[in-house]
């Protein structure tokens, strides 16, 4: 009996796969590339944030004047703490101007300042969370998209069996091969996306704690020195 050679090369299997499976693989590859792009960009961004936050905090605790610190705020372009400080300082200046018009010596309206600070912190957290939806989407849908390609490849194999009446390896191998490749690429896209997503969520929670600690200290300093008891 003559043996029929079966090409099991993965690249050849992809090239010979059905158009539906090829489109599925292309979608998974695009999602994976986007996720890696988001991951690299976010990693660089968080590293710069950490560097600038550290520099800003060192300057903040050494500063003798809020005005002087505000004038130098542009040095810390990536610092989330600096942006919160900027918003807080602007609101504090508005309160000071309103107080001078009323000829008072101490500020009032600390609730307004705290509201501005909370809103600023929320905006910073929202900015940090941007584009993480790509990681979450790929992590949750990647295996299912790969599973769709798997099912389609197996269906193709069964269709060939029905059409030829032959269940030999040469008939079913191409469909099974493309099906398994779809599963593998689906997992290869989803697993790094989930890992990156969890890593950045942990980084954001850490950043949120740092923001809350800074704003608590800042509010205490301001209330102690500028606001009425």
Image (cartoon, rainbow, N blue to C red):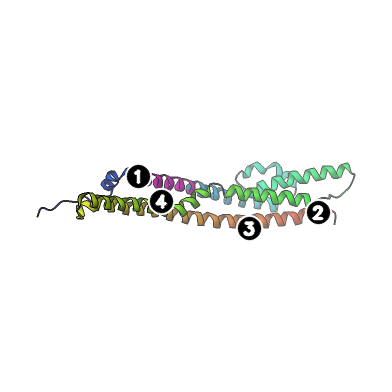
| Earlier-in-chain disc, 1 versus 4 | 1
Instruction: Mark 2 vs mark 1: give the one in front.
Output: 1
Query: What residue is pinned by disc 2?
Result: 225
Most common SS among magenta residues = helix
Q: CA distance from mark 1 to mark 3?
A: 47 Å
Residue at which label 3 appears: 209
x then y, percent, for residue 206: 59, 57
Bin the neighbour count of mark 3 within 10 Å (Cα to Cα): few under 14, some 14-19, many 20 and up. few
Q: Are marks 2 and 3 in contact (CB under 8 Å)?
A: no
Q: Identify the residue position indicated by label 4 in the image.
A: 145
Q: Position of residue 119 (x, y in %)?
A: 69, 49
Magenta range is: 20-39
* Mark positioned earlier in the residue sequence (4 or 2): 4
Determine the residue positioned at 66% across, 47% down: 82
Image coordinates for residue 127, horizontal then vertical, percent: 60, 47
* Residue that label 1 marks: 20
Pick the front one: 189 or 204: 189
Mark 2–mark 3 Cα distance, whole angstroms, equals 25 Å
């Amino acid at each position: 009996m003559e043996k029929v050679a079966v090409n099991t090369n993965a690249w050849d299997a992809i090239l010979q796969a059905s158009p539906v499976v090829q489109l599925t693989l292309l979608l998974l590859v695009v999602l994976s590339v986007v996720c890696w792009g988001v991951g690299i960009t976010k990693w660089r961004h968080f590293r710069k944030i950490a560097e600038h936050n550290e520099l800003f905090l060192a300057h903040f605790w050494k500063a003798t004047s809020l005005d002087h610190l505000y004038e130098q705020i542009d040095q810390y372009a990536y610092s989330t703490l600096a942006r919160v400080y900027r918003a807080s300082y602007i609101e504090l200046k508005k309160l000071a101007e309103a107080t001078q018009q009323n000829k008072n010596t101490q500020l009032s309206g600390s609730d307004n300042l705290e509201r501005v600070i909370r809103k600023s912190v929320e905006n910073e957290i929202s900015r940090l969370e941007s584009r993480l939806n790509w990681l979450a989407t790929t992590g949750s849908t990647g295996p299912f998209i790969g599973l769709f390609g798997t099912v389609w490849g197996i269906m193709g194999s069964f269709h060939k069996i029905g059409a030829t009446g032959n269940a030999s390896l040469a008939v079913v191998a191409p469909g099974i091969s493309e099906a398994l490749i779809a599963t593998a690429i689906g997992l290869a896209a989803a697993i790094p996306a989930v890992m990156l997503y969890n890593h950045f969520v942990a980084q954001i929670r850490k950043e949120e704690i740092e923001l809350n600690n800074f704003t608590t200290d800042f509010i205490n300093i301001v209330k102690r020195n500028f606001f009425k008891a």
